[in-house]
Amino acid sequence: MNKIKVGIIGGTGYTGVELLRLLVTHPSIDVALITSRAEAGREVVDLFPSLRGFTDLCFSPPDTELLTACDLVFSATPNGIAMTHARALTAAGTKLIDLAADFRIRDIATWEKWYGMQHACPELVAQAVYGLPEMNRQEITNAMIVANPGCYPTATTLGLLPLVQAGLIRSNNLIVDAKSGVTGAGRGANVASLFSEVADSFRAYGVAGHRHHPEITQNIQSVSKSTVDLTFVPHLVPMLRGIHATIYADLIDLDKSLEDVHHMVSSFYADEAFVDVMPLGSHPDTRSVKTSNMCRIALHKAGGSGKLVILSVIDNLTKGAAGQAVQNMNIMLGLDETLGLMSPAVMP
Amino acid sequence: MNKIKVGIIGGTGYTGVELLRLLVTHPSIDVALITSRAEAGREVVDLFPSLRGFTDLCFSPPDTELLTACDLVFSATPNGIAMTHARALTAAGTKLIDLAADFRIRDIATWEKWYGMQHACPELVAQAVYGLPEMNRQEITNAMIVANPGCYPTATTLGLLPLVQAGLIRSNNLIVDAKSGVTGAGRGANVASLFSEVADSFRAYGVAGHRHHPEITQNIQSVSKSTVDLTFVPHLVPMLRGIHATIYADLIDLDKSLEDVHHMVSSFYADEAFVDVMPLGSHPDTRSVKTSNMCRIALHKAGGSGKLVILSVIDNLTKGAAGQAVQNMNIMLGLDETLGLMSPAVMP
Amino acid sequence: MNKIKVGIIGGTGYTGVELLRLLVTHPSIDVALITSRAEAGREVVDLFPSLRGFTDLCFSPPDTELLTACDLVFSATPNGIAMTHARALTAAGTKLIDLAADFRIRDIATWEKWYGMQHACPELVAQAVYGLPEMNRQEITNAMIVANPGCYPTATTLGLLPLVQAGLIRSNNLIVDAKSGVTGAGRGANVASLFSEVADSFRAYGVAGHRHHPEITQNIQSVSKSTVDLTFVPHLVPMLRGIHATIYADLIDLDKSLEDVHHMVSSFYADEAFVDVMPLGSHPDTRSVKTSNMCRIALHKAGGSGKLVILSVIDNLTKGAAGQAVQNMNIMLGLDETLGLMSPAVMP
Amino acid sequence: MNKIKVGIIGGTGYTGVELLRLLVTHPSIDVALITSRAEAGREVVDLFPSLRGFTDLCFSPPDTELLTACDLVFSATPNGIAMTHARALTAAGTKLIDLAADFRIRDIATWEKWYGMQHACPELVAQAVYGLPEMNRQEITNAMIVANPGCYPTATTLGLLPLVQAGLIRSNNLIVDAKSGVTGAGRGANVASLFSEVADSFRAYGVAGHRHHPEITQNIQSVSKSTVDLTFVPHLVPMLRGIHATIYADLIDLDKSLEDVHHMVSSFYADEAFVDVMPLGSHPDTRSVKTSNMCRIALHKAGGSGKLVILSVIDNLTKGAAGQAVQNMNIMLGLDETLGLMSPAVMP
């Protein structure tokens, strides 16, 4: 059987190596090309020895002709790069999954404000699909461009989606206290991400404003009948992988039992391969999804206040980035959605 | 000069060794005795080599006569032990600082419900003083029994105290999302605290109810004019020391500027040696207080919602336990409150 | 196709959950049974949520009839248990792979000295095969009982095997300075393995003697023409998984070039799927094999002395335990040796 | 009493902040000046909030006039900077302690080979004193320039010094397998020191040659009657602070008892405040010296070979850098050698 040819733009970060980890054993895919200006010519396994024996690719400069020869291209670069490739790729009939933020925000002005640059192809934003399969599966099937969601927005949106859509909770007093492992900060050389700066410590960041806030709000607003007012505070955890979103919401009907809420959310996700609503009383730890494409969700009523507390965990590099990108790829290519993604989480 | 004799009941846990770390270099104190049934006869430095050269004490069985010969006794045992010593100690004129919870909750029924046992000396609870110096300094001065606050309640109460007391925030929609290092779980042998269970992972626990919830509520209610409704969710961080409380509150006057709020809180704590209100824009990390008795607080208005977000960090073993106990001891003995406590945090 | 039925004795430790992680996606295997006296009746996924969706097994008491109905049984218990099952299993024609030490040491007196108990079936030790496929592949093919090697012995033996066998190094001045992640200490509740005891620290242990020393010596002696004198010092690293053996050896021919040595070792392992001799100049990190069944080896001449330094890394739970057990199972059952084991290491 | 004025050149690294941590509470010292070109004008506490309340210094550009106005200057810069200040400082009568390597190697050619630059003041190398007080206390007393030892050389030399000097071990088969926490790699922004690169992993580095090898050899050779041949292999441990040297040596008299060796080493260090020879059977962990100026040493005969194994641990930032620098300062200034350094290690 002929394998489908995919390319990766910008493969030297953690998202890139995670994509490779998933793709080199994917039964239907051939990674034809992986680009990096800085590492062009170097063997991939020289940078990532974990892949020795699984690939003999070298990094190459980003060459439009080679990229458009692929059926599908992942862009795993910093923000602002994918949009410079999008026109050429789509014109050639090559599908694009952007793991950065270039196509996530529908309102161009909002995007330009938060990302501090001019958008290179605003007309393509309108036709791009936000790649959260549990929300937009049908549209992803036919998309030429998929905006792969951010890690915090994935965990948060999956936690809130059924509750907001069913009108069970108030949209104007939502609080998302989110925590991320350090790989979320990327593989760039900067002091703030040094082991000696983050190990054995914990802190919040970006309290006054974070780029994932408008993305989360856009998602929740799209399924809410009333105006969304949501507080989002991210924190940095001294661990490699994992997002833990602790979400606080007010039930509209205070007498609604937790069992009823749990039943509704479980039913909503009953057919989803990658969302696991855990039994009542559970406290999912991030390691329960480490290296897997699963999102695990637990529901509680908090002691004292009776406020609804939703716990939602993912691996930021897998369901929060590369795994979800492969899931989107499977959908876009008409493959089984779970292909190459059904490994249990690594524990411990 | 004759040093003041103190004793420690139950010195084999992390609170015990932290007390010793602070007391062996305290200029006015002589640790006369440290008890442990399980380790009786063993040299302290055999268990804690970090103290080699600083003490030649051996653990001894808890002997009432030796304890009442001390001027002051710390109880660093699990809950339910200090209350069995309290009558004998106070009768003999020996002051008691309990680092566990036996004297923290004024309502005996509430205490018995949360701690699952009958209280051994309810009449002494009434005369015990809750040992948060920034709240109760005057009462501590004259106390025979001080209930040393819990770690989460210390960080949370210091973050909320000036705001609630000044009536700046609504008391009925408070959310405390708190994170703790693993030493908070103690030195007991249990699977859930193994390195291999908590390293490189993150999780919430006790969402449906935690013993520190009634303690926090009691503190906040005591300074609030309206009814307190507070949601408290603790989490476990893969680090040794540190509490980070992220507190969400609604300003009553939405137009109140963050600068005004910051000025008020800064003024409130201006004379406190162990509360540091940081400049606007700060995100204190827990390592900025590691091993020190300091609480650092930062104030933000969250992006989007404008909700007030208070970040409050302490070292759970120092300001959250042994350091605060030494601070209370200094006050109770008429010493300079900061004696033995003025070392900078260890970074990194 | 009918799958082959396997059972697991003692599935509640880290070796047990790693076995399950590998077996639930193994294409030819059905895990029919997993035993635990302490957890009998409990769902496996209740203890290990990482496996939710991959198994609906419950732990059951160890029942001889059910175990002997399996084609092959893994014993993932503490030392001294597998030997009590071995006669019944082999009598019934059920193959046994013991992941503990009951069948590793050929000399019964030595075994009884180091493991502090009487051996229950010394006659079966003689017919058991030491399950290091790179050394004993042929014998494993026909074995009824395989003694799965210890984690330190695996890393060390693979590092030394070709050099000793070829007579390139002196056997009487070997030094193995080995380092292990904390999962190697097991999932038992004990203070020494608490996060708060091992995080952010490093130490040696067992310098005066460790059970893996006679096992390593037995391996090396079996391929050496002269008497082996080997110093072995293990250390504990604050990480979850991984063994790093740093081995110091004297070349017999001091003029032998490092290139020649490297070429010889590379040739020796050229056909091995799970041993990777890295390019000259490499320093393999343990994460380069995390969750994989690979052993990576690098060779150096040390600065100054010119002593040969061999670096050998494995994942203690995979190639050092469960992965190697699956490799042995594949060989014993006549399956492709790599079946179910060809995933890249997880990085980071 | 007038305090003694000291300056710090290059105070933005981990050695700089550790120096400040020790000096701001030192009873006889006033830090008059701390320099950084990159951070000139910025408040020290803005970079290091752990010091809030302890200093109001700002970083300033390195001004020779201000530096020579100090009684003593620490240079905590990268290699190659202190030597450019040395002539001016000594000419002005200002003592210099260099925490980098500019004055450690007596042979200029060797230094220039390993450090890849030309030495700026070779004539001052000859008069500089190597600042290991346990070896050179008398010379340090009168030194104008002290070369503060490297972290690995400190741990290793203290472990070997009494044994080599007494002629108890062979000098030509010494092996030092050393492990360091990540702060040893400094606070520079580089990918290899990112949390996501070093956490949950372990590796060797520099096996073919490391700058501390000639320094260690110089130390050992200076007390040995025969030629030193020493193998040195450093490793990186995922922890913040700490050096653990595991040293392998052959006793010249194989019948010498471990008790005798232990007694000799204990006697050698009996009067040293900062070397602790632990009881037989000990395995010092690095946390037993965390934040303290102590070196702890344990002695073993290894199982099997009977080789002498010396375990030596220090905190790389304290006894391995800033603490030892303060110890040297105390000696050079005629103060009590232990002043400002007598705090117990932080545990855990």
Image (cartoon, coloured by chain):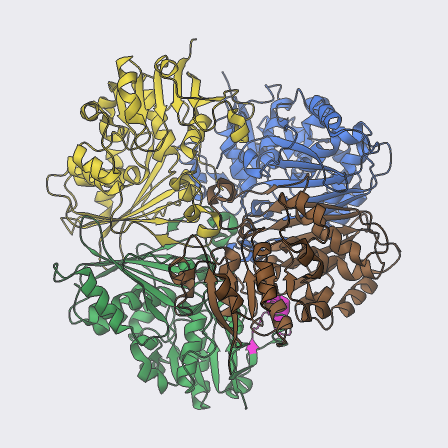
Chain colours: A yellow, B green, C blue, D brown
Determine if the magenta segment contains residue D16: no
**Residue at x-position 31% and y-position 79%:** B136
Task: Give the image location of residue B181, x and y in percent.
Answer: 43, 57
Please determine whether, in this image, residue C93 is positioned above or below residue D149.
above
Determine if the magenta segment contains residue B49: yes
**Residue D177 seen from this side:** no
Please determine whether, in this image, residue C91 is positioned above or below residue A113.
above
Q: Viewed as shown, does residue C133 lie left or right of A268?
A: right
Please determine whether, in this image, residue A15 is positioned above or below residue B256.
above
Q: Which residues are magenta?
A: B34-51
Q: Viewed as shown, does residue C4 lie left or right of A155?
A: right
**Residue D71 seen from this side:** yes
Taking depth in this image into account, of D342 and D89 the one nearest to the observer is D89
**Residue at x-position 58% and y-position 22%:** C338
Taking depth in this image into account, of D81 and A45 the one nearest to the observer is D81
How many numbered marks does the figure carry?
A: 0
Q: Viewed as shown, does residue A15 lie left or right of D166?
A: left
Q: Viewed as shown, does residue B92 lie left or right of B281?
A: right
Please determine whether, in this image, residue B101 is positioned above or below residue A102.
below
Residue furthest top as drawn? A1
Task: Give the image location of residue B55, x and y in percent.
Answer: 61, 75
Task: Give the image location of residue C203, x and y in percent.
Answer: 63, 54
Taking depth in this image into account, of B171 and D173 the one nearest to the observer is D173
Task: Give the image location of residue A137, x and y in percent.
Answer: 25, 25
